[in-house]
Amino acid sequence: MTKVVVSNGNIDGALKKFKAKVARSGVPSEIKKRKYHQKPGVKRREALKEAKKNAHKHRSY
């Protein structure tokens, strides 16, 4: 459970911190993944595609 302390009645700041903590924990991306069922082969292909994209992105010249 994600918790944020509101200091000096600053609800906007606390909400911003809460949203950042939730995003960092990976909950929104997990919800997107679980929304629809994917066959195992499709999951593998997507993971390989993502790995290739990340490897290309982090390539050093």
Image (cartoon, rainbow, N blue to C red):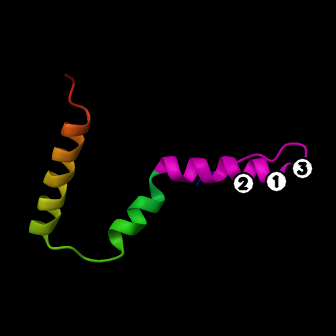
- Label placed on residue 11: 1
In contact (CB < 8 Å): disc 3 and disc 1:
yes
Q: Are marks 1 and 2 in contact (CB under 8 Å)?
A: yes
- Separation of marks 3 and 2 at Cα, in angstroms: 11 Å
**Magenta segment: does it hold 29?**
no
Residue at left offset 30%, top offset 77%: 36
Q: Earlier in the sequence, mark 3 or mark 2?
A: 3
Provide the residue span drawn in magenta: 3-25
Identify the amino acid type marked 1.
Ile
Main SS of the magenta segment?
Answer: helix
**Which disc is residue 9 wearing?**
3
**Residue designated by label 2:** 15
Q: Identify which residue is drawn at 33% across, 66% down.
A: 33
Q: CA distance from mark 3 to mark 1?
A: 6 Å
**Residue placed at 21% from the left, 46% from the top?**
53
For residue 61, what is the image quadrant?
Answer: top left
Taking the image as shown, residue 13 lies to the left or right of residue 1, namely right
Displayed quadrant of residue 42: bottom left
How far across and down, in percent of the image, does residue 9 sit? 89, 49
For the view shown, which residue lies furthest in the bottom direction? 36
Q: Is residue 28 above or below residue 9?
A: below
